[in-house]
Amino acid sequence: MSSPSILVNRDAEGLAHAVAARLITRLVDVQSSGKVAQVVLTGGRVASAVYRAVAESPARSAIDWRRVEFWWGDERFLPDGDPERNETQAREALLDHVDVDPGRVHPMAADTGQGAEAAAAAYASELAKAVSAGDRDGVPTFDVLLLGVGPDGHVASLFPEHPGLHSEDVSSIAVHGAPKPPPTRISLTFPALNRSHEVWFVVSGEDKAKAVRLALSGTGRLQIPAAGVQGLNRTLWLLDEASAREIPSSIRAPRT
Ligand SMILES: O=C(O)[C@H](O)[C@@H](O)[C@H](O)[C@H](O)COP(=O)(O)O
């Protein structure tokens, strides 16, 4: 397992455009081998800025969007179409603006009264159906998995000291009592999050600086869930100056 690479951009806008350019290039590279690209989206303000930057980029036309499989790392368990759902935000920022194959877009279920546990189980089944030879932990091997990081070090909807951190035998769980609203969510588990060739933490803002430092300095994953996820081949911390401010200069690459 390689050590993480840390790349620092001047500010939030520069970070969003740099990650968008990197994502476009990554998808083109994966597709150039004839593969359908497997991408795991995340929610939050920084991720949405990246999706918007992808949608605005002229280079987006280099991607065959019908050969990209979209998954989510977590979802806010709200009614379909709720503006706070990660799916809603990703569609508004990107998916509604490119020619995706609807059959390859896999949102986590909305709250239709079935309960979060049933929704989580349904997602685990959908992931399992997409598994092929060589895949593990009930999920396809992803090509890039995006993660925002909370000020408390949460990723997806895995929050510090929460029971879901111990789920090892399922790919997707219901989360209750999340400290970040809404309280009920669906999330991939650590085993599932750790099944991507590349994991990209995309983090902006001074309020994340402590979590970034702790995640990169050996803190345990129960206290800082971001410390519990890494790529099979590559782990990137894509930061801005504000979120990188507490990282020792000895481990920072020069600003991109
Ligand atoms: O449902 C969510 O909110 C996200 O999946 C969550 O994990 C998010 O990525 C982080 O909280 C960072 O969010 P910001 O980028 O908005 O700070």
Image (spheres, rainbow, N blue to C red):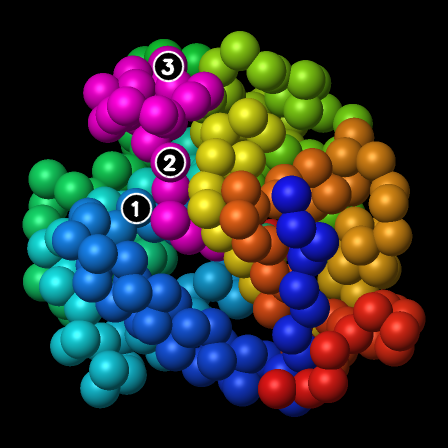
Q: Quadrant of the C terminus?
A: bottom right
Q: Quadrant of residue 137?
A: top left
Camera-side residue of 147 and 150: 147
First in sequence: mark 1 vs mark 3: 1
Q: Quadrant of the N terminus?
A: top right
Residue type marked 3: Ala
Query: Residue 83, position in %: x, y?
Result: 35, 53
Question: Tags 2 and 1 in contact by the CB under 8 Å rule?
Answer: yes
Question: Residue 184: in sight, yes or no?
Answer: no
Q: CA distance from mark 2 to mark 3?
A: 19 Å
Residue labelled with disc 3 = 121
First in sequence: mark 2 vs mark 3: 3
Residue labelled with disc 2 = 141
Is 153 drawn above or below residue 123 in the view shown? below
Instruction: Point out which mark residue 38 bears.
Output: 1
Question: Tags 2 and 3 in contact by the CB under 8 Å rule?
Answer: no
Query: Residue 189, position in %: x, y?
Result: 54, 27
Is 135 on the left-hand or right-hand side of 156? left
Is 31 colored magenta in this rendering? no
Question: Residue 172: in sight, yes or no?
Answer: yes
Mark 1 surroundings within 10 Å by alpha-carbon count, few (fewer than 14), some (14 through 19), many (20 or more): many
Residue bounds of the magenta highlight = 121-149
Query: Residue 101, position in %: x, y?
Result: 9, 50
Element carrying mark 2: loop
First in sequence: mark 2 vs mark 1: 1
**Residue at image point 43% right, 14% down:** 117
Residue type marked 2: Thr
**Residue at image point 59% right, 15% down:** 168
Element carrying mark 3: helix
Count of numbered circles on the image: 3
